[in-house]
Image (tube, rainbow, N blue to C red):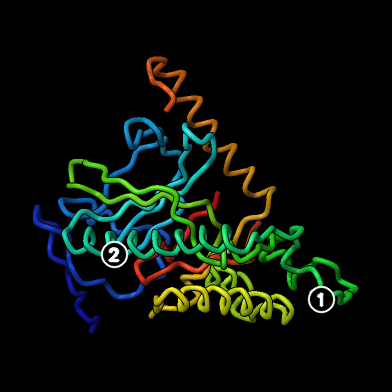
Amino acid sequence: MPKPRRRRPPPSDGPADESPPPASDSDVEDPRDYRRGGYHLVHVAELFKHGRYVAAKKLGWGHFSTVWLAWDRQQQRAVALKIQKAAAKYAETAKDEVKLLKQVSEAFARHRDCRGLVSPQPQPLGAPADGATSGRGNAVDDGDVIGSVQNSFVKDAGIVELRDHFVHRGPHGAHHVMCFEVLGPSLLQMLKATDYRGLPLSQARRLARCLLSALAFIHAEGIIHTDVKPENVLEVLNPTDAAGFDTIARRVDAASRAADPTVGDGGRAVCALSLIHISEPTRRTPI
């Protein structure tokens, strides 16, 4: 006799659930979480912060937020907007994340001013380190899983860069929004792409070095990460992939201007560590 399936209660008009749901391999967030206190329902070409940012494409999602590719009309570049759920718990956590990221940004500035650091020449992730040679060049086992990404000086220290933050009000409440550079897939997604066989040793070593450098940097600032895991380690894009995201975001911006001509203008690490556990998404949709 088949086992009866447990039914989930219908969505209510109250705040979104405070506790995370069980882990899921779904590539799409639960549409029932688009409600009061939950996700903001973003539309392509939607404007944020008085028209400065134009939403272009959803990049991914997590239990606390969705992340969208957007075009920054002021700086003329593609960015990633992390849009938190509106419930009070998520708003408070977002404030804590912004506080920590601003602390790290200030530390970056001190290092630049005091040490005069300069960025080295970009190196692909698969390139031999410390003068070593390799017959395979930049190839990655079983296809270009990671691709080539750039090296960085300590300015980045392998930590995500907070570029802006603001509150966006929508029908589901007030959503805290954080603006970051556009990053690539997570380490978990890279491992899945290898069918969990793992990365080549040379790349694993470089990722480990980047991760340890990031942790050392934040520890020196009195910050403890508490949730280091593959989902929170993101690839830094190579120039070709970054240009592709720029093109997508710029085209959406151009189309939105054409539809409404009254609208006004408003050195790299091999990985970037999300600063605290809410720095999701843990899942990402393809370009």
Horizontal and vertical percent for residue 256?
Answer: 43, 25
* Left or right placement of residue 20 versus residue 60 in this view: left
Mark 1 residue crowding within 10 angstroms, few (<14) / some (14–19) / many (20+): few
Q: Residue at coordinates 34% horizontally, 67% vertically from top-left?
A: 278
Q: Which callout, 1 or 2, points at the residue further toward the start of the chain? A: 2
Q: Residue furthest top?
A: 261
Q: Residue at x 65, y 49 (%)?
A: 241
Q: The residue tagged with tag 1: helix, strand or loop?
A: loop
- The amino acid marked with disc number 2 is Asp
What's under tag 1, amino acid-wise?
Asp
Residue reaching furthest bottom?
1
Residue 98 placed where, x, y %? Answer: 34, 59
Residue 14 placement (x, y as % from top left) = 9, 56
Packing grade of label 2 (10 A; few <14, some 14-19, many >=20) is: few
Give the left or right position of residue 251, taking residue 57 as reference.
right
Q: Quadrant of residue 236?
A: bottom right
Mark number, residue 176 = none
**Displayed quadrant of residue 51:** top left
Toward which corner of the image does residue 211 lie, by quadrant? bottom right
Q: Viewed as shown, does residue 237 lie left or right of 135?
A: left
Quote the CA–CA distance across marks 1 and 2. Answer: 39 Å
- Residue 69, image x, y percentages: 47, 45
As drawn, 265 above or below 47:
above
Q: Which residue is mark 1?
A: 130
> Quarter holding the N terminus?
bottom left
Q: Nearer the viewer, residue 209 or 34?
A: 209
Q: How many marks?
A: 2
247 displayed left or right of 178: right
Cβ–Cβ under 8 Å for marks 1 and 2? no
Helix, strand or loop at mark 2: helix
Vertical placement of 135 versus 60: above or below? Answer: below
Label 2 sits on residue: 96
